[in-house]
Image (cartoon, rainbow, N blue to C red):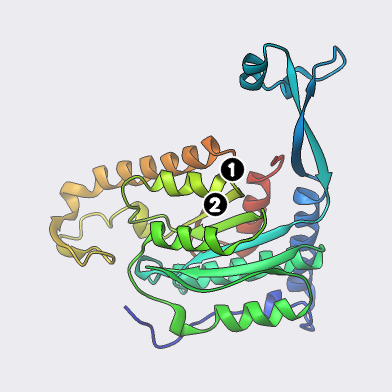
Amino acid sequence: MSIKELHIDFSRHHPHAKIVGRRELLSKDIEGNWATTFKGRGLEFTGYRAYNYTDDASTIDWRASLRSKSLLVREFEEYRNFSVMFLLDVSNSMLFTTTKKLKAEYGAELVYALSQAASDSGEAIGLGLFSDKLQVSFQPAFGKGMHSRFEKTLSNKEYYGGPKDFKKSFLQVNSMLNDKVIMIIVSDFLGLPKKWEKYMLSLASRHHLMGVMIRDKRDRELPPHTGQFVVKDPNTEETMYIDTDSYAKEYKVQSLKQEEYIKKVFKKLRGSCVTIENGADFKKSLEKFFNSHQGMS
């Protein structure tokens, strides 16, 4: 699936735009929230040492202690600047909407806003767009030039479309990154392959994972009393004939169940994930993102 044009508005998030009122306030809020949520929270594991009675018991590594037959605590070193890698899903399932913007367009604006906040706070930022493969990517780097690089990449319609392949895309991004990063994955997380958790685990073993699950209203529920339709899987092209009255209730249950499972996977991997509805108020969506990631380790 390809698209003729993209409707992405970077102007209200542009660091050099002459904007006033609500837009200027939003820009300041984003940067302030980023600093509050992340600055000074980065911790790098440096090793173990013997437990002391003054130590916090929560720092005890019980597995390591059992192996060594003595109580050991984990030691961390705080770092105030870090690299952030943004991964945006641009596959076919993201080229859908019941609002004014495609999920991919909404996601691109969200990625742009967060990336500029991270950059202005002193972090190195990188970007990858993926569908059935990593369509384009560049490693985290510093500098104001990254603003225009993000804007140019996110607004290129040639990168959008195609079936989704989490396995291939995640293996590619894992191999291209040289250092540990905070990885923010923006996707609808639909059409996941079997054992997709395995590939998430490979990423989590090296990086800190954070998810932004963008779901359209129609991803969560079918329109009631609308009759019979032929639906098609955007990744496999498989079609199915359904009656919305018969499937609507179960569709909603399974959709919400899947969302919760995805969040549990992130949590299990010591990450976090937030669900944002496509077309939702941008400021509220960003607040939800920051609130969900407060206290990250």
Q: Residue at x 44, y 87 (%)?
A: 5
176 w.r.t. 100: above or below:
above
Q: Secondary structure at mark 2?
A: strand
Q: Is residue 225 visible?
A: yes
- Crowding around mark 2 (Cα neighbors within 10 Å: few <14, some 14 to 19, many 20+) is many
Q: Which residue shows up at 26% across the image and 44% down it? A: 249
Question: Left or right: 132 with respect to 234?
Answer: right
Task: Report x, y in % for residue 117.
Answer: 74, 65
Callouts 2 and 1 close, C-beta under 8 Å:
yes
Q: CA distance from mark 2 to mark 1?
A: 8 Å
**80 to the left or right of 243:** right
| Vertical order, 233 against 48 (above or below) | below
Q: Is residue 115 left or right of residue 204?
A: right
Query: Which residue is most to the right?
Result: 54
Residue type of the residue flagged with mark 1: Gly
Q: Residue at x 73, y 14 (%)?
A: 71
x and y percentages locating residue 59 in the rendered image: 74, 24
Circle 2 sits on which residue? 211
| Mark linked to residue 45 | none
- How many marks the image carries: the answer is 2
Residue found farthest to the bottom: 4
In the picture, which quadrant includes the C terminus? top right
| Image position of 193 with respect to 283: above or below | above
Q: Position of residue 55 (x, y in %)?
A: 83, 19
Residue indicated by mark 1: 271
Residue type at mark 2: give it: Gly
Front position in the image: 273 or 278: 273
State the image quarter where residue 258 is shown. Answer: top left
Residue at 24% over, 63% down: 233
- Is there any visible trace of residue 10 in the rendered image? no
Q: Relative to residue 247, is residue 152 drawn left or right?
A: right
- The quarter of the image holding the N terminus is bottom left
